[in-house]
Amino acid sequence: MSRRILPGLPLSLSFTLAYVSVLLLLPLAACLTKAMSLSGEQFVAAVWSDRARAAYAFTLSASAISAVIDIFLGMVVAWVLVRYEFPFKRIFDSLIDLPFALPTAVAGLVYSSLYVKQGWLGQFLVPLGFEAAYTRLAVVLVLTFIGLPFVVRTVQPVLESFDADMEEAAFLLGASRWQTFLRVILPPLVPAIVTGFALSLARALGEYGSVVFVSGNMPFRTEIAPVLIVSRLEEFAYAEATAIAVVLLGISFTMLVIINLLERWTSRT
């Protein structure tokens, strides 16, 4: 009589497939079906207009810039949390997860109130030429805030598990601090950094709640693709909005596949 290694496999597998189908496959199928209701010319006109191309370009550039900034900030924050002891460390550590719990609309409202001309920070920064409200810079700042925890939480466990004896051995062999970081510490961190970058980028590509309050939503300047989708929905152009969403979904999926392949390659090397 054969005995299964994992009892309850049919039930758990059925539940998993039903869960994925209801929450993922069915919405995707509905989205594709709605977009396919357009003719070829209508689809191209909806997804490749001048306004749509400008929104794609700004969305990708702002998301990529914010994800790169998150890499550097996240590594510094993770390094400080792992390597140093200071008062209220646990409180500071818990605040890193604030963007996960905080509604993104609240983050956008806070940023816009801080950096407007009459805001707490804006009243000092705007006269110096630093305008961080209703500009492209505002979008990058908000996306950086939203994506920072992904990098910190992926790099932090790797740093915690890192063997300090390897650093000591490098110092004893005459390596400088910079050489030790580049050749001993950084290589094991690369897969975690790539994962954090991918998560931060994917989060930024679909962000709407916080950006809508700080960007000004100006077409060809500060309008992102999710805002354009909502704009089409408000015009009752549901098929056109769905077509833009399909393009954005395709871009996100393609970038995630590329980054995951890069992550596997770096983990093997």
Image (cartoon, rainbow, N blue to C red):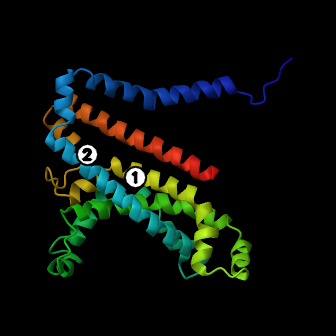
Give how far across and how far down residue 144 sits, in percent. 36, 62
Residue at figure coordinates x 16%, y 38% from the top left? 49
Which of the pair 164/89 is nearer the observer? 164
Q: Residue furthest front?
A: 174
Mark-to-mark CA distance, 1 and 2: 14 Å
Q: Position of residue 109 (x, y in %)?
A: 25, 62
Query: Does the rendering let one see residue 157?
Result: no
- The quarter of the rendered structure image containing the N terminus is top right
Q: Nearer the viewer, residue 29 or 165?
A: 165
- The residue identified by callout 2 is 56
> Looking at the image, which residue is at 28% across and 50% down?
59
Q: Which residue is mark 1?
A: 201
Q: Is residue 183 left or right of residue 133?
A: right
User: x, y percentage for residue 194?
Assistant: 51, 55
Q: Is residue 198 left or right of residue 27?
A: right
128 relative to 148, above or below: below
Say what amino acid the circle numbered 1 marks: Leu
> Helix or strand or loop: what does disc 1 sit on?
helix
Query: In which quadrant of the rendered view does residue 170 lie?
Result: bottom right
In the displayed structure image, the side of residue 184 where residue 194 appears, left or right: left
